Image: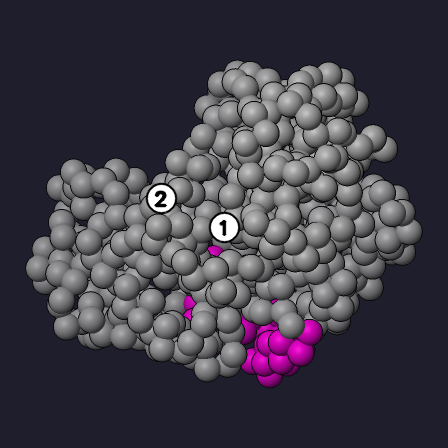
Amino acid sequence: MKSSKWYFNSVFYQIYPQSFQDSNNDGIGDLEGVIRRLDYLKSLGIDAVWLNPVYPSPFKDAGYDVADYKNIAPRYGNLNTFDRLVKEAHRRGIKIIMDLVFNHTSNEHFWFKNSQKMKKNRYSKWYVWCRNPELIKLNRGCWAMWVAERYESYYHQFTFYQPDLNFGFPDLPRENGNSYDDPDIKALREELKGVVRFWLDRGVDGFRADVPENLVLESGKEGLHENTIRFWNEIRDVIDSYGDRALIAEGVLYHVDDIKKARFNGCFFILQNWRLLTTYLEEYRKESSRGKFFSPEGGDISWFVEDYFKEYNEVIKYDGIINMISGSHDMPRMSKVCKKDEIIKAYFAMLLTYPTAPFIYYGDEIGMRYWENLPSREGANFRSGSRTPMQWNSNGNAGFSGADPSKLYFPVNKDYTVRNVKEQEKSPVSILNTVRKLIKLRKSSSCLNAFSPIRHLYLKKDDKTYIYSRYNENEGFVIALNPSDTPRSLTVKLTLEEKEFKGAMYLIPEIFSHETEKIRVEKDLSFKFPANFFSVYRIV
């Protein structure tokens, strides 16, 4: 197990750069703004920052439509600013993770502008082109029909503005590049490996790969395509040549294969975290929700735990980990479901004591609210409500920017005067300071790391309470979660053969949402939980 690698022992923080901190008062966050807030991240206990794309782009999809892989969008600064960010972050012991968007580029990328030309050139096969796409039956995506100079249509899994790169789509005609070993396709791969080297040479500590699972699709085939696997192994070899660097998969479908076959260090538990913390999937599919565990009404969490450890127990065999998240730029903020600050704290208690490499989405550590029906910008759609400016203080624009409010990337949520970093700094029981305590405890207690054992002491289907222990030969903790509005009294039976309880006398509450008494360790552990409760007990 590579438990000594920095990646597995880190707490990550995701920054959506447009909305984090504006340093030049143009209404859009930038890299200089991130530099100015590094001390805050250090005080929070953050080990590594994941930056959403900062490359030049026409911003049809908020930067995930990349127009140049080897530069910085002027709205964020320039390469010199980026280099300073890496230097200043490293000076504080914080690592920098960048987004790799290799599934597609912008249709304004130099490569695509040349690929779409009638006259054959070195870029002609770099994208997925076909004269008769009706003959190719792929399970997702669309074809942009006859919009190029050449008499063909191009394939895009996402928007019209994001043509897919070609890693050897087997269904294509040979002249369009249907082989991974085609010299023109190899030239594309070498160019992309050069992109990875470019940023590693500038000191970045790793990458999060956007939609890495579907680089190649083939009619009638499911799972990771062999060409996709071959490519990510080539990228892994490049990264490994720089020493201890991380490669993380977005991780939508194939967690074990991402890590086992494609050699990612970890992957996000995306769909399961969505189901746990949002109602969007149910609303989209017009399904009725049975209730959310982290909500006032409460709900079942046994499905999540079962799914998580089914994947977790497999991936750790291959030196990987599953990444739990508090949220992301792609999903409604968890406050939409949690509704109450105490419930948000309960989720952080789980996130930061679970065997995972945890990611915190900017603003979740102060419980920033999801803004319903905020008008879309740069392709955000419903995601707009999760991309509002970071709320630093009660000054104008929440301390995010000195620009006129009409010029802000997104408007500031109206609750910023009471929900902001400065206000929460003052209260020892705020979400912010609770998160700080949990991060500090995680770092100081080896049994709370990504690989120490976990025991589910109380976990029942359709139950609103979850209790588990984390332990090793040196220490142990019991984490009790009762986030719903329903107070509970319950008993956990012990055999006293459990390693973590041998010789123990008490469970001493260490971090909690409500004052609670110590619990005597006997054959029965008797708990009385108020509503919206969590506690991390030390076993002594």
Q: What stretch is highlighted in magenta?
A: 64-92
Q: Counting other residues with Cα less than 10 Å from the Cα at mark 1, is it few (<14), some (14-19), or many (20 or more)?
A: many
* Closer-to-camera residue (233/305): 305
Residue depicted at 16% across the width and 62% down the height: 180
Quarter holding the C terminus is top right
Rendered location of residue 395, percent (x, y) = 89, 56
Q: What residue type is labelled 1?
A: Phe
Rendered location of residue 376, percent (x, y) = 60, 44
- Is 274 magenta? The answer is no
Q: What residue type is labelled 2?
A: Glu
* Closer-to-camera residue (254/527): 527
Residue depicted at 23% across the width and 40% down the height: 222
Mark 2: secondary structure: helix
* Closer-to-camera residue (174/191): 191
Quarter holding the N terminus is bottom left
Q: Quadrant of residue 351?
A: top right
Pair 2/1: label in front: 1
Q: Name the residue under label 2.
A: 314
Mark 1: secondary structure: loop
For the question of whether residue 207 can be seen, the reply is: no
| Residue 76 falls left or right of residue 303 | right
* Most distant residue in the left direction: 174
Residue 156, relative to residue 288: is it above or below? below
* Most distant residue in the front direction: 503
| Residue 398 falls left or right of residue 238 | right
Mark 2 to mark 1: distance in Å? 12 Å
Rendered location of residue 278, percent (x, y) = 58, 32
Q: Name the residue under label 1.
A: 451
Q: In which quarter of the image is residue 195?
A: bottom left
Rendered location of residue 359, percent (x, y) = 58, 51
